[in-house]
Amino acid sequence: MHKFEKIWMSIGTGSLILFLVILGVSAVHAGHTPAASGIETIHPDYVRDDNRFSEPGLYESSEEGYDYDLYYVASAFRYEPAEVEVPQGSRVRMQVVTTDVVHGFQVVNTNINMMVEPGLVSTYGTNFNTVGEYLVICNEYCGVGHTDMTSVIKVVP
Ligand code: CUA
């Protein structure tokens, strides 16, 4: 075999092996661990098996810097919980997942605006300082019920 052919063949084989190794590594990590980017992954089919998302809602946070964790499950065409009360002044870590397609998670009249993609946990930390009712809307077109997809956050004194 020609010398250059050998070199190119080994480069080809090498990159194939490297590719398979990377695939294998990501398959192993596809459970509940943070991806390399620091974004947490979650398998859309097993969202309900995760303690946070089996009964989504407001829970006291063990996370430093937060009073509460607020968990949401988005699916066509609703959010769970549909309504939640948050004490005024709370530091809240919101985590949103989807069980099906891409949804949006926008809290009207705030900076909170996330894309919720299958396979990822979307996280947003915020303070709810102003009493009132905040409408959560889906801002990614997700099907016929898209415009009905809402939830309410009530910030109470
Ligand atoms: Cu969900 Cu649009």
Image (spheres, rainbow, N blue to C red):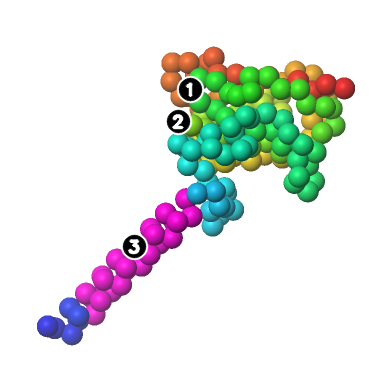
Secondary structure beneath label 3: helix
Q: Ligand 1: does it lie within 8 Å of the C-beta at label 2? A: yes
In the rendered image, the vertical position of residue 91 relative to residue 83, given as above or below = below
Q: Ligand 1: does it lie within 8 Å of the C-beta at label 1? A: yes
Residue stretch rendered in magenta on the structure:
7-30
Q: Is residue 53 visible?
A: yes
Residue shown at 82% from the left, 27% from the top: 87
Residue annotated with mark 3: 20
Tell which circle, 3 or 1, labels the residue nearer the N-terminal end.
3
Q: Position of residue 123 (x, y in %)?
A: 64, 40
Residue 20 part of the magenta segment: yes
Contact flag, marks 2 and 1 (Cβ < 8 Å): yes
Cα distance in 3D space between marks 3 and 1: 35 Å
- Picture quarter containing residue 71? top right
What's the magenta bit mostly, secondary-structure-wise? helix
Residue shown at 43% from the left, 16% from the top: 144
**Callout 1 amino acid:** Ala
Image-based side of 142 in relation to 85, left or right: left
Residue shown at 73% from the left, 34% from the top: 59
Q: Position of residue 10 (x, y in %)?
A: 25, 76
Secondary structure beneath label 1: loop
Q: Position of residue 44 (x, y in %)?
A: 47, 37
Residue annotated with mark 1: 76
Residue 9 part of the magenta segment: yes
Residue shown at 48% from the left, 22% from the top: 76
Residue annotated with mark 2: 101
**Callout 2 amino acid:** Val
Q: Nearer the viewer, residue 43 or 12?
A: 43
Q: Residue furthest left?
A: 1
Within-10-Å neighbours for mark 1: few <14, some 14–19, many 20+: some
